[in-house]
Amino acid sequence: MNNETTNHSARLTKEKGSTLNGDLQVAVGGELHQIAGGQHPALTTNQGVALSDNQNSLRANPSGPTLGEDFILREKITHFDHERIPERVVHARGTGVHGFFELTTSLKQYTTAKILTEVGEKTPVFTRMSTVAGGAGSVDTPRDVRGFAVKFYTKEGNWDLVSNNIPVFFIQDAIKFPDLIHALKMEPDRGFPQSSTAHDTFWDFISLTPESMHMVMWIMSDRTIPRSLRMIEGFGVHSFRLINHLGESTFVKFHWRPKLGLQSTIWDEAVKISGADQDFHRRDMFDAITSGNFPEWEFAVQLFTQEEADTFPFDHLDPTKLIPEELVPLQVIGRMVLDRWPNNFFAETEQVAYCPSHIVPGIDFSNDPLLQGRLFSYHDTQLSRLGTPNFHQIPINAPKCPFANHQRDGQMQMAQPAGRVAYEPNSLSAESPREAPAYGFHSAAVTETGVKGRIRAASFADHYSQARMFYISQTAYEQAHIASALVFELSKVEHVHVRDAIVGHLRHIEEALAKRVALGLGIDELPDAPVAAMPVQEMKPSPALQIIGKMQDTLKGRAIGILIANGSDGAVIEQIRKAATDAGAAVKIIAPNVGDVKLAAGLKLNADGQLAGSPSVLFDAVAVILSDEGVKALSMESAAIDFVRDAFGHLKAIAVDKGGQTLLKIANVGQDAGVLDANDKEAFIAAAKTRQWDREKSVRTLA
Ligand code: HDD
């Protein structure tokens, strides 16, 4: 035993006031290491006491116990032990970004809210997009609804529009929410599945809740496996009210529409992305923001009066119903640009607290019973998550306009209101805050009559008409994906009676769909359809509900991967790279190893990604440029074979030179209009902007 005291402590060579200037020498394993110099603030305790040594705790002697006296060790470890707060009970996994909202058309006729009347005004926003079911550390790409919550820091207070990427919801009344979420999340006895609805309890609940069938159609569509958070729509779901200067109110539904258009992945692709990059969506957003490719959404409204609502063939207060664009057109009134990544994930993205009850004068709630329950739930959950009614003082939650009232004290109170008056009315203070009847918040003047009770309105009884409308509005490819998703999900359900019950519901939506799903599940005889509370109404298809129809013919926001190896032709690579970059795509060079690849003619090219870590699922289209030597090397690499097989299977355009073509043959990949000569760059770029939908029937059996 060496009882000598060895100097393991950090030593600072120069000191200038409280800022330390110079090289830091750190002892690791007895050796001194130099760490680059610079202007460093002194490392201190939370009380501001500078530390002389952050590497070693205070010990009685070199082989003795650690001393309880070590307040530095205790403070550091204690703080660390308390770093976590409860994750959100739903929407735990999310990505937040700062940006701004700009109004382009005034709604002055309908509302007094400045955010909706001051054209050209840029209002700061913080937007968080999320999955619903998984925990905070779950993957980004399960089949799941995406949350789309926007906090507008308006001049008149914070307005939170807490939306999803689906315009309807599973249930009609908030009292069902805990049941829905308990059924949807991991099963309580076994603790799985994480972030997936493909299990018994979810489908059991759904089978007994026919009002959810419309939303089920949406979640079984590719909307729930988006390509990017930059390519999803957002919907406020509920009807809200706008109130004008005369006190008149108009109903409104809010919509976000991505400038990049809609794009989804294919199920097999989403599954593989989950393995290749758990943070696929967060990284995609980070890369876009930090490279200056700021995503943008149009903000649109549907406006309608009570008289118009009375003519709709559904109740707009029922959150399982949407208002077809063909019935009430969307008016684009503004835009949102996300342009700044948060400084700190926890401080901002984790601590941001959205509440649908955060609303500003000129906007009001409707009587949608789901919305009414949400008005209570969010504030309540923030108390448990953030631990104090003062969560509005956390910088990400604080209004950017002045705010003052007589609420006082509480845990983590940061404000220091001066004076002896903390009540209203008072005659003692000339400065204390008072009511502002002229411009303060007024609720819509609505007359309510009737008999109190636990009631579901008769106008909420139509559970299948819009589910059918959604299904018949889809292209044949999208319908096939819905059928396949239902087969996949229900194949994971062990209880046969639950599968049968769902197929029974599908019969109300579309008999052919029920038959496809039954066939996929090996159900020989179609189960009876349950008795519907109301006959299904035939509604006109609404093409606006498709994804394919809203996909944009562009490479902007998309990514191209070029697979190369030693001996590849640099001129062909450059040609494809330039054409793709000019078209707006991000291009990555993939090779068996990162670092320099030795191209033909003595050229060298630095690879961005290593083949095994950069599968084709991470790209929207690929090129394979290989010499004979390269093909030989890659023909034995399963990652290379998977690269081209998956690109083909996921309906992507593939550009190949002679060597690339040989790799396709070795991988047993077929030929079609989406497999193109790498020298025909125009054709490749055109094909890369879309998916090769016609190929699908040759690569997979769809239900
Ligand atoms: Fe909710 C979070 C969206 C119904 C209760 N919800 C949450 C988030 C979004 C939505 C986007 C994440 C916010 C964030 O990023 O922090 N929720 C919706 C939509 C709904 C909906 C669009 C239906 C139209 N939610 C809903 C109901 C209830 C809740 C009916 C309860 C009665 N939701 C919550 C919550 C959460 C939440 C438990 C969890 C974390 C949080 O609020 O801040 O209160």
Image (spheres, helix red, strand yellow):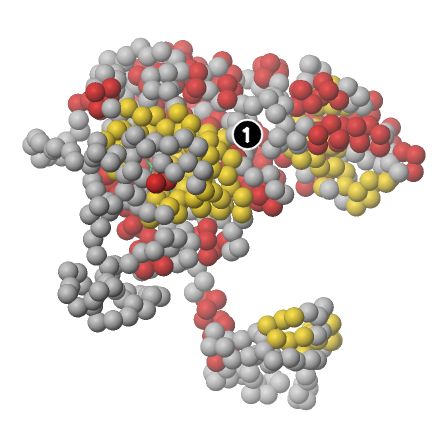
Position of 359 with respect to 283 (left or right) is left
Q: Is residue 73 above or below residue 544?
A: below
Quarter of the image for the N terminus: give it: bottom right
Position of 299 with respect to 211 (left or right) is right
> Residue 93: where, in percent of width, then height?
46, 45
Q: Which residue is mark 1?
A: 260
Front-lying residue, 271 or 151: 151
What element does badge 1 sit on? loop
Q: Residue furthest left?
A: 451
> Residue 634: where, in percent of width, then height?
79, 33
Front-lying residue, 432 or 498: 432
Identify the residue at horizontal 54%, vertical 48% (top origin). Answer: 341
Q: Is mark 1 within 8 Å of ligand 1?
A: no
> Residue 625: where, in percent of width, then height?
79, 28
Q: Quadrant of residue 691?
A: top right
For mark 1, does the 10 Å Cα neighbourhood hold few (<14), some (14 to 19), or many (20 or more) residues? many
Q: Is residue 615 above or below residue 427?
A: above
Image quarter for ligand 1: top left
Q: Is residue 143 visible?
A: no
Identify the residue at horizontal 51%, vertical 41% (top origin). Answer: 338
Residue type (three-letter) at the residue carrying disc 1: Leu
